[in-house]
């Protein structure tokens, strides 16, 4: 069960893909990090951040990467239970990630600015708009898409989503884009 949970955290946190191994990373990822370091030498001793794409299919991954690139998507959501079951730390403020498209091509670097744990039924319209990258019915869209996603992911373990389930709400800023 712990292995499944760990995999789900990597695969599904905020609809993220599995983390790439260094050998499978597209060269655009390391090139983006090198360019970022050249422009920001104060980070020259930092390790290259993890790279991943949002969601689990090409259409959604590419759409969400573009929303990050255009600074419309500013948040991501995952189940607190996945972290707890895997005994994993919650995301840390100032952590950077390289966002890619579905094919692993680097699109942007994000930096975590805020992390909250909030019940599903307490998610705000403001947060939903940041996560969905839209101001058109963001809470309605957030609730539907995340309920469906969590329900599908939880089926394998026999769990079901609830209105009170805790959501890890990660707010981020796009700090670098493909040049």
Image: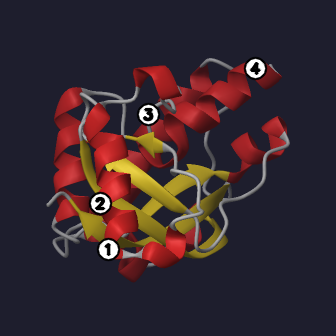
| Mark 1 / mark 3, whichever is N-terminal | 3
Residue at image mark 3: 17
**Marked residue nearer the N-terminal end (4 or 2):** 4
Q: Which residue is mark 1?
A: 39
Residues at marks 1 and 2 touching, judged by CB atoms closer than 8 Å: yes
Find residue 27 and report its horizontal and vertical position in percent.
Answer: 29, 34
In space, the residues marked 1 and 2 are separated at their CA atoms by 6 Å
How many residues crowd around disc 1 within 10 Å: few (fewer than 14), some, or many (20 or more)?
few
- In this rendering, position of residue 87 left or right of residue 179: right
Residue at image coords 15%, 67%: 70
Q: Earlier in the sequence, mark 1 or mark 4?
A: 4
Q: Which residue lies under the disc numbered 4?
A: 3
State whether residue 162 is above or below residue 150. below
Q: Where residue 134 sits in the image (x, y, percent)?
A: 20, 69
Above or below: residue 138 compared with residue 145: below
State which mark lies toward you, 2 or 3: 2
Name which of mark 3 and mark 4 comes first in the sequence. Answer: 4
């Amino acid at each position: 069960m712990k292995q499944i949970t760990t995999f789900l955290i990597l695969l599904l946190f905020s609809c993220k893909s599995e983390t790439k191994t260094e050998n499978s990373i597209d060269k655009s990822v390391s090139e983006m990090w090198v360019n970022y370091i050249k422009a920001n030498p104060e980070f020259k001793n930092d390790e290259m951040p993890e790279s991943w794409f949002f969601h689990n299919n090409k259409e959604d991954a590419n759409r969400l990467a573009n929303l990050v690139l255009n600074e419309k998507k500013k948040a991501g959501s995952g189940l607190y239970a996945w972290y707890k079951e895997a005994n994993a730390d919650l995301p840390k403020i100032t952590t950077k990630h390289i966002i890619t498209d579905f094919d692993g091509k680097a699109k942007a670097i994000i930096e975590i600015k805020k992390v909250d744990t909030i019940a599903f039924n307490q998610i705000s319209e403001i947060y939903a708009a940041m996560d969905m990258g839209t101001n058109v019915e963001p809470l309605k869209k957030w609730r539907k898409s995340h309920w469906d996603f969590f329900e599908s992911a939880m089926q394998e373990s026999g769990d079901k989503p609830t209105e009170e389930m805790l959501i890890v709400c990660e707010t981020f800023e796009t700090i670098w884009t493909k040049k």
